[in-house]
């Protein structure tokens, strides 16, 4: 089965808020980088490319053809980018990916406001807890949105 690579993340401390982020009683969870190419999770101190692998940020949206990977290829690709760029790229953990999902119940996929032109299909997670067939698929956006686990699937 072939899947799309989830937007890789690096765990780097974000020292300054991007332009346009105003102080509020409840600070926002996400902000955009100054050039708009990254979504910054201000609470977790993570940066996410707004474009999946194979697509490129043009200043307004993502263009190009998304690359397809199996899990091993996605993991290897993130490691190769880490080595090439010196930035700690990796696949997101399931809990991190869950925060990036479109919050509207009828929708599926990454939040289109944060990730324009992102494919609506599944994205890989770095969480390696795969159960036997017939169990809840932890990579399904429907299960992530509803907080389903193998323990509460019934």
Image: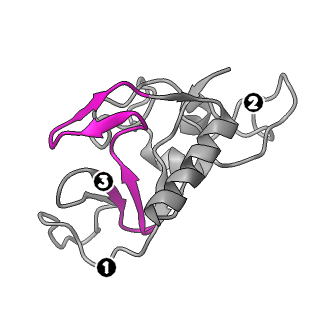
Residue 86 falls left or right of residue 23:
right
Distance Cα–Cα, label 3 vs label 1: 15 Å
Q: Secondary structure at mark 3?
A: strand
Q: Mark 3 or mark 2: name the one nearer the start of the chain.
A: 3
Q: Residue at x 52, y 46 (%)?
A: 97
Distance Cα–Cα, label 3 vs label 2: 31 Å
Give the class, few, some or many, for how many residues have Cα within 10 Å of label 3's Cα (few <14, many ≥20). many
- The answer to which of 94 and 2 lies nearer the viewer is 2
Residue 113 falls left or right of residue 73:
left
Does residue 58 show up magenta in the picture?
yes
Examine the image and state in which quarter residue 90 appears. bottom right
Q: Mark 3 or mark 1: name the one nearer the start of the chain.
A: 1
Give the class, few, some or many, for how many residues have Cα within 10 Å of label 1's Cα (few <14, many ≥20). few
Does residue 62 show up magenta in the picture?
yes
- The answer to which of 154 and 81 lies nearer the viewer is 81
Checking the image for residue 38, the label placed there is 3
Q: Residue at x 59, y 54 (%)?
A: 79
Foreground mark, 3 or 2, reads: 3
Magenta range is: 38-66
Can I make out residue 70 in this image?
A: yes
Q: Mark 1 or mark 2: name the one nearer the start of the chain.
A: 1
- The answer to which of 31 and 85 lies nearer the viewer is 85
Checking the image for residue 136, the label placed there is 2
Marks 3/1 in contact by CB < 8 Å: the verdict is no
Residue 133, x across and y down, in percent: 85, 24
**Mark 1 lies on residue:** 15
Q: Residue at x 41, y 26 (%)?
A: 119
């Amino acid at each position: 089965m072939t899947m799309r690579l989830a937007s890789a993340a690096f765990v780097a401390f974000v020292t300054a808020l991007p332009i346009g982020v105003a102080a509020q009683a409840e600070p926002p969870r996400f902000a955009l980088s100054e050039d708009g190419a990254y979504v910054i999770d201000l609470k977790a101190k993570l940066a996410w490319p707004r474009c999946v692998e194979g697509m490129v940020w043009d200043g307004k949206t993502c263009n190009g053809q998304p690359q397809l990977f199996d899990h091993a290829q996605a993991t290897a690709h993130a490691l190769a980018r880490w080595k090439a760029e010196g930035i700690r790229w990796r696949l997101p953990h399931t809990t991190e990916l869950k925060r990036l999902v479109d919050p509207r119940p009828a929708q599926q996929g990454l939040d289109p406001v944060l990730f324009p032109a992102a494919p609506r299909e599944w994205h890989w997670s770095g969480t390696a807890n795969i159960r036997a067939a017939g169990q809840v698929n932890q990579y399904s956006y429907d299960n992530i949105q509803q907080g389903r686990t193998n323990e509460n699937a019934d």
